[in-house]
Image (cartoon, rainbow, N blue to C red):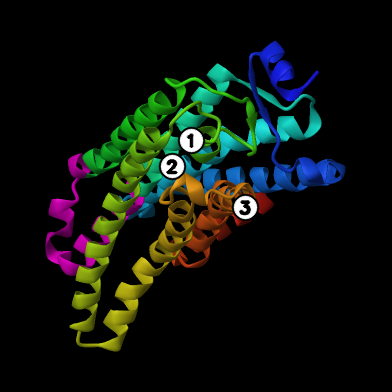
Amino acid sequence: MNHQENATAWSGFILVAFAEAHKFYPLIFVILLCLYLITLTTNMLIILIVKSDPIFNSPMYFFLMNLACLEACYMTVVIPKLLENLIMKPTVISFVGCAIQMFFFLFFGVAECFLLATMAIDRYIAICHPLRYSVIMNRNACLKMVTGPYICGTAVGLVHTTVIFSRPFCDVVINHFFCEIQPLLELLCGETSLAEIQVIGVAMLAVMVPFLMILLSYTGIILTVVGMPSKESKWKAFSTCSSHLIVVILFYGTVCSTYLKPKSNYSPVLDNILSFSYTVVTPLLNPIIYSIRNKEIKGALRNLWNKRISL
């Protein structure tokens, strides 16, 4: 039975990424499972710390808690299915399951793009308008600023999923480890240039709009920091932004390399590597970056560890 007949019998797509490394599947499974558990644990720890300690009752940590939640969900959309495919044959995902996976992957990914922009705006207000910060960033404003990214994520996820799954597929073999846009575009029948333009257009809005918001926010921050009188003030202002800036560079670098390019430049091997980077590596590094560069979180982690030892 060939791939297409096999997938038809199972009513789904066949995921064939990493097929050449099938001898190492047990090792890949163990490593990936460990990374997944570590990522979930670190992100859940940040959520627990922010929720349990009154010292973190500020907009910055409220947004950080939402980012940790998004990272955990973002990774969970992809990794459990990948782990299943590493130990079970055939590596099939149903058509409905593929559409659901694609929607939620886009939902959490786009929501993270806009949440990072929200965090940049929060840092801009904190540094450039410190006396008005508590008034501008009140609880109601914070809730609205968090709701916006989820609305944008829902819209983009629906648009992309509808564009892709409203067209017939000429093949069912996905050269990828999950249902992502570029590999699925490769499988569409007939002329796909219109679908490709729609995908790139929506991706540009979803990626470039928050990126421009971040760029404008940091331009204002840099101008304000440069005008500060003392080196101590400059260093303090910079230290509150450094973690966020590192996370933005990691996330946007890989996402832009994947989505803001035409289908003609699609490379399965490179795309697999980039996708692995922002689905596994980035969610793992983000909480570590914030923990290492934040004294309050490091202190809370030490207290939590000391309490655990004493118990």
Q: Position of residue 233 (x, y in %)?
A: 27, 80
Q: Amino acid at mark 1?
A: Phe
Which is more N-terminal, label 3 or label 1? Answer: 1
Q: Position of residue 76 (x, y in %)?
A: 57, 35
Disc 1 to disc 3, how far (Cα)? 17 Å
Report helix, strand or loop for mark 1: helix
Disc 2 to disc 3, how far (Cα)? 17 Å
Q: Of 122 and 274, which appears nearest the observer?
A: 274
Q: Position of residue 1 (x, y in %)?
A: 81, 18
What span is colored magenta in the figure?
114-141
Q: What secondary structure characterizes most of the magenta part?
A: helix
Q: Is residue 85 magenta?
A: no
The residue most toward the right is 23
Q: Of 174 and 153, which appears nearest the observer?
A: 174
Residue under label 3, please give it.
273
Q: Is residue 138 magenta?
A: yes
Residue under label 1, please give it.
105
Q: Is residue 104 above or below residue 295?
A: above
Circle 2 Cα neighbour tier, 10 Å, few/some/many (<14 / 14–19 / ≥20): many
Q: Are marks 2 and 1 in contact (CB under 8 Å)?
A: yes
* Nearer mark to the viewer, of 1 and 3: 3
Report helix, strand or loop for mark 2: helix
Q: Are marks 1 and 3 in contact (CB under 8 Å)?
A: no
